[in-house]
Image (spheres, rainbow, N blue to C red):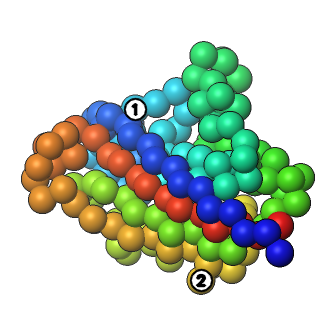
Amino acid sequence: MKIRIGQGIDFHRLEKGIQLWLGGINVPSEKGCSAHSDGDVLLHAICDAILGAAGFEDIGHLFPDTDPQYKNIDSKILLKRSFDLVKKGGFHIINIDSTVCLEKPKIAPFIPEMKASISEILETLPENISIKATTAEKLGFIGKEEGAVAIAVALLEK
């Protein structure tokens, strides 16, 4: 048995008039994450966590924002492609632990749906996916509602 751990982090600026995608679902909000893709900070952090655990390069290298084919791409596709690489490497998910830092909206009511979406893509049970939510207590760019951050850790087994 070979166990590997990886971590990922992603930041995006929040802007009015953009849909907020988190964990593969659309969360009602006045602001969304500005990005080349759909800006799903949680899925991006999870992609980097699983890719790192398997020893691959990050999503910025694999799916560059300079490539027009990734413009406005659904981040669930990026997660699926990342997981396909991880599977080809002989790994499967033991668990994912993640945190989203966002002043508003409150995302706790949406976490079960996010877990279901992510677990389906990663071919694991929802109880193997942990998503926590926190604010920045009005501090910094997150507290001023200018941005969002997600952090993820993945444990894989070969």
In the image, what residue occupies the spot 70% across and 31% down?
A: 62
- Where's the N terminus, which quadrant? bottom right
Give the crowd class for mark 2: few <14, some 14-19, many >=20 residues within 10 Å.
Answer: few
Q: How many numbered circles does the render carry?
A: 2
Considering every residue shown, the one lying at the far left of the view is 138
Which label sits on residue 157? Answer: none
Which label sits on residue 34? Answer: 1
Q: Is residue 11 left or right of residue 115?
A: left
Helix, strand or loop at label 2? It is helix
Q: Is residue 31 left or right of residue 93?
A: left
Q: What percent of the width, then of the height, locates residue 128?
A: 62, 78
Q: What percent of the width, then of the height, locates residue 29?
A: 31, 51
Considering every residue shown, the one lying at the far front of the view is 2
The quadrant where residue 31 appears: top left
In the picture of the structure, the residue carrying the numbered disc 2 is 127
Helix, strand or loop at label 1? It is strand
Image height of 22 relative to 16, above or below: below
The quadrant where residue 6 appears: bottom right
Cα–Cα gap, marks 1 and 2: 30 Å
The quadrant where residue 123 appears: bottom right
Q: What percent of the width, then of the height, locates residue 51?
A: 68, 48
Camera-side mark, 1 or 2: 2
Q: Check contact, mark 1 vs mark 2: CB within 8 A.
A: no
The amino acid type, in three-letter code, at marker 1 is Ser
Which sits in the foreground, 127 or 57?
57
Image height of 38 relative to 120, above or below: above
The amino acid type, in three-letter code, at marker 2 is Glu
- Where's the C terminus, which quadrant? bottom right
Q: What percent of the width, then of the height, locates residue 157?
A: 76, 70
In the image, what residue occupies the spot 41% across and 53% down?
A: 150
In the image, what residue occupies the spot 59% across and 31% down?
A: 60
Residue 76 showing in the rendered view: no
